[in-house]
Amino acid sequence: MFYLFEQPERVFELTLEHIRLVGISVLAATLIGVPVGILCTRIRWLESPILNLSGILYTIPSLAFFAILIPYTGLGASTATIALTLYSLLAIIRNTIAGIDDVPRATLDAARGMGMTGRQRLFLVELPLAIPVIFAGIRVATMAAIGIAVIAAVIGAGGLGRLIFDGLRTLDADQVLAGAIMATVLALVGDWALKRLGDALRRDAGAAAEGR
């Protein structure tokens, strides 16, 4: 614990690196995964192969994944970002599909009866109602990415993993503990923030739907 107070500037710098690495990866996975999930709800035969592929990618051990990517993307944050993005896809795609599939059939029938097009139903009805489930997937992906990003320090990606691996190398348990504590705090804060954001978006979407 003393390391947190003795080296606050380094801890803060590495925490920012960790946030940047995870944030970019999860954002990229969301921008890819949500449209892919929507596509799977429209073209059903794509659902099984896409979920199977993303599931296979998720089961690859992180160090092995880094080793596969390094010859093409080199050491550093780029390789870690690609790996974390691919790891995050499964939860986001799966929850996007589940969220849209959970929209009540009666609600969709009512939207059709009002003359809404498929695009209008998607953006005005399905996605707003699916937001809680989609954000649950983003939260799961974020928590996993925070943990995996710790391991990414071994390939020079930076982040809080540097504290842990530097501590292991020098047998400095206090430094290891500092990295572990900050990673845990980051995960808890990230989960809380995403939950609040998801709740706010759900309320906004509900209010907009009532207004329409």
Image: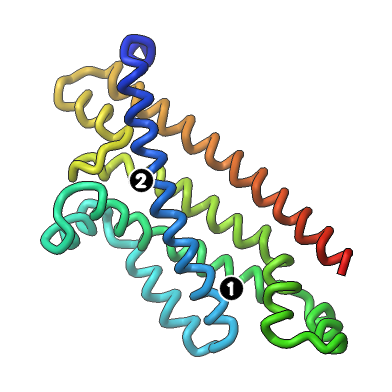
Where in the figure is residue 6, as x and y percent of width and height? 32, 10
Q: Residue 147's image quarter?
A: top left
**Residues under labels 1 and 2: Cα distance?**
26 Å
Frontmost residue, 155 versus 117: 117
Instruction: Tell me: residue 3, above or below residue 157.
Output: above
In the image, what residue type sits under mark 1? Ile
> Label 2's element?
helix
Mark 2: few/some/many CA within 10 Å (<14, 14-19, 20+):
many
Find residue 99 and report its horizontal and vertical position in percent: 65, 68
Quadrant housing the C terminus? bottom right
Q: Which labelled disc corresponds to residue 21?
A: 2
Is 15 positioned to the left or the right of 118 in the image? left
* 28 in relation to 177, above or below: below
Q: Residue at x 57, y 65 (%)?
A: 95
Residue located farthest toward the left when viewing the structure as drawn? 71
Task: State the residue at coordinates (16%, 50%).
Answer: 75
- At label 1, counting other C-alpha atoms closer than 10 Å, the crowd grade (few under 14, some 14-19, many 20 or more) is many
Q: Position of residue 173 (x, y in %)?
A: 27, 18
Q: Residue 141 in the image: x percent, y percent?
A: 47, 54
Residue drawn at x 60%, y 55% as measured from the top left: 136
Residue 71 location, quadrant: bottom left
Give the residue at mark 1.
97
